[in-house]
Image: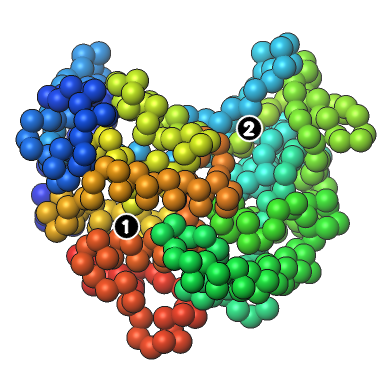
Amino acid sequence: AYARRFGVLECIRFGSKVLGAEYAGVPEEQIVAAWERWAGNGEAFGDGTGEWLLTVQHRGSEHTQMYRFDFLILCIGMFGGVANTPTFPPNRGPEVFHGQVLHSKDYSDMDAAAAAELIRGKRVAVVGSGKSAFDTAAECADANGARFPCTMICRNPRWMVNGGFVWGVSIGQLFMSRLAELMVARKPGEGLALCLLAMLLSPLRWLTSKLAEAYFKMHIPMREHGMVPDRSFSWTISACRLGVLTDRFYDRVAEGSVVIKRARSVSFCADGLVLDEHDAGERRVEADVVVLATGFRGADKLRGIFVSPTFKEMVAGGPDNPAPLYRQCVHPRIPQMAVIGYSDSSSSIYHYEMMAKWVAHLLDGAFRLPGVGRMERSVAEWGEYVKRHGAVDGEGPCISAVNTWYNDELCRDMGYDPRRKKGILAEWMQPYGPADYAGIR
C-alpha cells in the first residue's frame, strides 16, 4: 500500500540484474587525483558533467539495456551473493568427494520439500560456527534424529547466546549505551581527554565482559561440549560476531542427533571429510551431504558491481583500510555514489536506516561534504578503529561497540542534536534505538 500510494512501484524494475556500473563524463584520472572536493564541488550531484551508466539484463531476455543516472546508491546487502568458500589442498577439495557439497545459502534457497529430500536419511556434515551452521545442524537433526546424526564441524566457536539479558541487565545496556561506549578507547575523532578517560575505565569494560561470559557459561552447556570461545565477549560485540543460539540446540547434542567436532582444518576425501583435530591427528567423518556454512564475501560482492578496475580496488578497501567509506556511506574518490549496508552493527536494519537518512539529506542539499583530504583522514581513523576491534577479511567493517558515537556524527552532519533522550540517566544508561531518531526525516 505504501509503495503504491507514493509511486514507488513505478520506479522498480523487478526481475532485473545489474551487470555493471560505470561512471562517465569525467576522466578517471581527474576523479582520483585532481579533485579536492567530492564530485568536484562537495555536493551530491557534482557539477552535472558526470553520470552513472548501468548495464541491466532483464529476466527472460538475452539482451541488455543501458540506464543513465545522476546518482547511484548501492543497497546490495552483505549476506548473500559471493559465498566465502574455503580453500583446500590439491586433490583434497570437493572434487574428490562422491557426495553433494553446497553452501548454506544454496540450502536455504531451496523450497521446504527439496531441502527435506536432500537431507532425509543422509549423513550430513555442516562446516561452520555461526548462526547458519547452528540452524542448519538443528534442522538436519530434526529430520534424521540420532539414527543419522548431523556432524557440526567447528574451528573457532563463537558466543551464541540464549537471551538478551545478563544477570538481569540487558546486553544493550551493558555494551551499547553511551556509558559503555565511553569505555571504548581511541574512538574515531576522539579527543585526548576522552581517550584517557576510556583507558581509565577499561578495567570496568573487561569486568563487564567477564561477568557476561560467566553468566552464559553457567546457563549454556558450552563447556561440556568444548564450545567455549577463545575470544572475549566484548571483542565479539565489537566484531559483530554475537549470535542467537538455536532453540534447544544443546538438547539435540545431548540426545545424539547433533555431534560437534572441533578441527583446525577440514579437507575432503571420497566418502566424507578429513579433520585435523589439533593433537589427535587426522580423523575421518563419513558424509553424504556437506553444507558449508562459512559466510559470505561482501567485499567481493561490492567490488563486482563496478566496471572500472580502479573503483573495484578502492571501494571495499582491504586489510590496511578495512573501512574505506566516509561516514560508512560514500567513498572520498568515487563521485555521485553511496553505499548503504556495507558496514554492520548489532542491529543492522536500524543502522542502515540511519545511513539512508544521512544519504537522503545529502541528496536534498542539507549539507556539503568536506574536502577529500579531510574525508580521507576520517576514513583512516575509522579504519584504525576497525583493525583494533575485530576486522574480518572479506567482510565490511563492524561499528557495533560505537554505534551511538557513529550516529552522533550523522546527526551533526544533518543538523540535529545527537543527544536525543529525556534525562541524563536515560542518555547515558539506555541504548539508543530507532525510536530515538524517529524525528529525523
Asked if residue 93 lies left or right of residue 399, the reply is right
**Badge 2 element:** strand
**Residue to which mark 1 is pinned:** 353
Task: Identify the image's colour scheme: rainbow, by chain, secondary structure or one colour.
Answer: rainbow
Q: Quadrant of the N terminus?
A: bottom left
**Three-letter code for the amino acid on which mark 1 is drawn:** Glu
**Three-letter code for the amino acid on which mark 2 is drawn:** Leu
Q: Is residue 160 above or below residue 127?
A: below
Asked if residue 353 lies left or right of residue 347, the reply is left
Residue at image x 37%, y 31%?
Answer: 314
- Residue 328 shows in the view: no
- Residue 187 shows in the view: yes
Q: Is residue 61 above or below residue 435?
A: above
Q: Is residue 304 above or below residue 255?
A: above
Q: Is residue 197 above or below residue 388?
A: below
| Numbered badge on residue 292 | 2
| Residue 151, percent from left and from top | 76, 38
Of callouts 1 and 2, the N-terminal one: 2
Residue at image x 17%, y 52%?
Answer: 368
| Residue 232, percent from left and from top | 69, 58
**Badge 1 element:** helix
Q: Quadrant of the C terminus?
A: bottom left
